[in-house]
Every structure is written in structure tokens, then in C-alpha cells.
Amino acid sequence: MTMKSSTRQVDGVTIVDLSGRITLGEGSVVLRDVVRDLLSKGQKKILLNLGDVNYIDSSGIGELVSAYTTCKNQGGELKLLNLTKKVHDLLQITKLYTVFDVKDDEAAGVKAFGQ
Amino acid sequence: MSANRVSYTLDSTLETVNSAEETAGRMAAEAGFDDEEVMKISMAVREAAVNAVLHGNAYDPTKKVTLAFERTARDLIIVIRDQGKGLDASRIPDPLAPENLLKTSGRGIFLIRSFMDVVEIHPSKTGTEFRMIKHVHGSAADSKEASQ
């Protein structure tokens, strides 16, 4: 039920591998803390890998939006990678799919930063 | 087919949100919905439970959330009620409006309406009731009813 996260660096981009659920409570808090921590350390190119995120609720969607705007407001970039069908469909119906820069290939996602 | 009804009285906690979601998923699966529909129903119930616990009862330990499921031949009917001040859904901004797309909240009721076939919101001074219906398509119950 809980969400796990780990980060790694690839060519100056921080890839955050998330797994589990981004929902009200722990999942949303984990995401918020990870993004805030990265930004505080000056790591402003963030690729959120949601390939193992199998569930997200409205609170989780709000947290993704918050992460995106927080990053942008600090001069950074946040992109999404490997959406599951459920998350893809949710972003579609909420019209956020076109707001986020969504990638389905990690190498292409990393290259897309700073272009 | 006679209606099957079950109801729960729950605390205003985050555990209630998770419990409501899980129970809805189980009820929906038992009602014969496929995996995608089960996910939609359980998510709609989760969002309604979030609304009841957070915005309705505001985590007040003295206030309860009631959750009821009713299965008929045609429908799965789910009712969630809180003991808050009453929600005026008309005042919730359209989350799809361009100026609201980057807001971090306000999508719960939109998702409920997206995932359920019928959604009625009944606010009163003693709380808000969400009545949500998902039609049972192509089920054994439908076939039985059609043959009668």
C-alpha cells in the first residue's frame, strides 16, 4: 500500500523511481518530500519514473501538479516517465496529460532536459 | 432478485478512506464488474470518502461516516454520508478550466462523476450525502431479468 522512492543520477538529470500508490497520506507526502529535498540541493532536472506506480488518487494528482509547479517556479524542469495505463488515463481525463512533459523512454527523457 | 444491502459506520480517519476503497473494490468485483470498472468504482468511493472525512467531518473524532452498498439486478448503489456542514458542489470550480488546471486540489468530485453512471450530491445542514450508481452491464442478473 505504501509508496517507495529512490533516486539516481543520469547525465545531470535526477531520476526518481517511484513505486506503489500516490494517494492522500503517505504516498503524497513521500513525493512532496523527495521533490523538495532535490530542489533544496539544487537538483532541478527531475524525471519522475512512474512505471511502478499502480494507483494515484486526486490527492496524488494534486501532488504531481504541485511538484511540477514548484520545480518550474524554481527554474527547474520536471518530466514524467513510463506512465501506467491507469495513470495515463487519469491524466487524460483531467486534461493534465498535455500539461506534463511525458516520456516513455528513459534515455529520450534524459536527453529532453535543457532542450 | 432481492436487493442486498450492507452498511458501515466509520470513524473520520484516513483508515476509513482506505477501508471504504477496499470494500468498494470487493463489492464491485462480487457484483461482476471487470477489473477496470472495479478500479473506477473503488476510486470514486475513495474520493467520496476523502470528501466525507476531510471536507465534511474535518477529521472530527465525534463525527462518523456512513457507507452503504446496495446491489440490485441492475445497479450497484453506493451511498456515503458525513456529518459536516453540507457541501455546496456548485461552488467547486471546474477543474478542467484552463485557469484551474494547475490547481493542486478540486478534482475529487470530477473524478467521481467521471467514473460513476449516476452521481447525486445531497447537502444539508447536518451533512452531505453522495449517492453513486454504477449500472451492471451484461451480468447474469441482466440476462435473468431480460428473460422474465
Image (tube, rainbow, N blue to C red):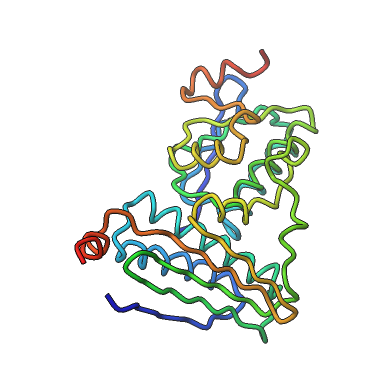
Q: Position of residue B99 (x, y in %)?
A: 78, 37
At a point 50% along the width and 66% down the height, the residue shown is B18
Q: Is residue A59 visible?
A: no
Q: Quadrant of the C terminus of chain B?
A: bottom left
Q: Is residue A48 above or below residue A61?
A: above
As drawn, the residue found furthest toward the front would be: B148
Q: Position of residue B5 (x, y in %)?
A: 39, 79
Location of residue A36 (image quadrant) = top right
Q: Quadrant of the N terminus of chain B?
A: bottom left
At a point 70% along the width and 29% down the height, the residue shown is A44
| Figure label count | 0
Q: Position of residue B76 (x, y in %)?
A: 40, 66
Q: Is residue A19 above or below residue B66?
A: above
Q: Position of residue A2 (x, y in %)?
A: 49, 57
Q: Is residue A23 above or below residue B14?
A: above
At a point 75% along the width and 39% down the height, the residue shown is A40
Q: Is residue A10 above or below residue A70?
A: above
Q: In this rendering, would B62 be left or right of B113?
A: right
Q: Is residue B72 visible?
A: yes
Location of residue A64 (image quadrant) = top right
Q: In this rendering, would B102 be left or right of A24?
A: right
As drawn, the residue found furthest toward the top would be: A115
Q: In this rendering, would A109 be left or right of B74?
A: right
